[in-house]
Image (cartoon, rainbow, N blue to C red):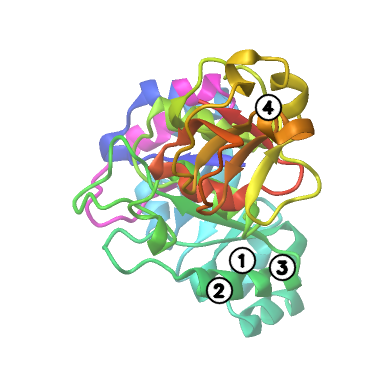
Amino acid sequence: MLGYSIYFSQLDMSFVQKMDKKGIKTIFTSLHISEESISQEKIRHFLDDSKKNNRDVVIDISPNTLQAIGAKNYIEMKDLGVKTVRIDFGISTEEIVEMQKHFRIVLNASTLDEQKICELKEKGLCLQQVIAMHNFYPREYTGLSLDFLHNKNALFNKYHIQIWAFIPGDKVLRGPIFAGLPTVEKHRNQSPYISFVELSQHFLIDGIFIGDLQIEDDTLNMIERFDKEGIVTLPTKTLSPYIPKDIIYNNRMDESEAVIRIDQGRELFSKNEKLYTATKPGKRTIGTITVDNSEYFRYMGETQILKRDLPEDSRVNIVGNVQDEYIALLDFIKAGTRIKFE
């Protein structure tokens, strides 16, 4: 699931409406960020609009939230259209259990250890309906390591708790630091698309939110394609005009160690003289896209994407290259993965 974040001091309703049209309606926001100064009227207006448009606004709450939102108690927030609350601080275990009768409960993954999970379960919290949400980290070098994320998630999986996390944006970053808002430090200066694929596939994260203000349309489209259809889009820096971009290809089910083998390659390209005629051999580095020429006999038309450097071969024609920025995606193309060149 893809979600995004809004910040009331920089609320852009045109972006919200664009996401509405795409069916992306799960939104994270916090009402106790130090640099945010917001009127109750603005918050209530947005919640009312979200209720009418069937958005699920996930509010980061603490005892200060009631004052910010102008509610007498937490239950009154339900009448304002709030369906999901992320518990931050100052709320007791008993209150959390009571609130689950009215809201979907999201807990802070960073402070949720096994002792706390067992305590919540003993008090009556239904863990199967709970979400553990990792923080985002605005300051450089403070994001989580992949090892820490893996170990934390193993704990949540043990208790069947869903997991959410953040990826940075790549268009409008949020200040005052403007260094991206990722959960994982490795993702800070990486394409949000690659980060999304990694969190989804390697870490089985259930919900992934754009932490920053906005994301590029091309990036969003690639994320959506993967999220909804499981298609890994590979942007190319060069590609033969005889390799169609409008076809969805498949990696073979018998996954190879050194290359991605396009299942349809020989069927599609063994009859195209422009592709099977031998050309001057070239350097085959990771991310190179190749088609076997007529000198490879029955393998003529075999289409591959290299997962590591391989030696030159006169029987293999080079027909394209994946963009350097997206080479990391090759690690996430497994047996049967659907692929689109762009």
Q: Are marks 2 and 1 in contact (CB under 8 Å)?
A: yes
| Residue at image mark 1 | 96
Residue at 68% across, 81% down: 119
Which residue is the site of mark 2? Answer: 92
Which tag, 4 or 3, sits closer to the chain's start? 3
Q: Nearer the viewer, mark 4 or mark 2?
A: 4
Amino acid bearing label 3: Asn
Tag 4 residue:
294
Instruction: Provide residue 211's location: percent of width, then percent of height.
Output: 40, 47
Q: Looking at the image, is 176 positioned above or below residue 237?
A: below
Pick the front one: 206 or 266: 266
Residue 26 seen in the current view = no
**Does the magenta segment cover residue 279?**
no
Helix, strand or loop under label 2: loop
* Residue 301 to residue 135: above or below: above
Which mark lies nearer to you, 4 or 1?
4
Residue type at mark 1 is Ile
Q: Which residues are magenta?
A: 18-46
Residue at x 22% of width, y 48% of height:
175
Distance from the alpha carbon under mark 4 to that under mark 3: 51 Å
| Residue beneath disc 3 | 157
The residue closer to the viewer here, 29 or 153, is 153
Label 4, residues with CA under 10 Å away: few <14, some 14-19, many ≥20: some
Closer to the camera: disc 4 or disc 3? 4
Observer-nearest of 144 and 266: 266
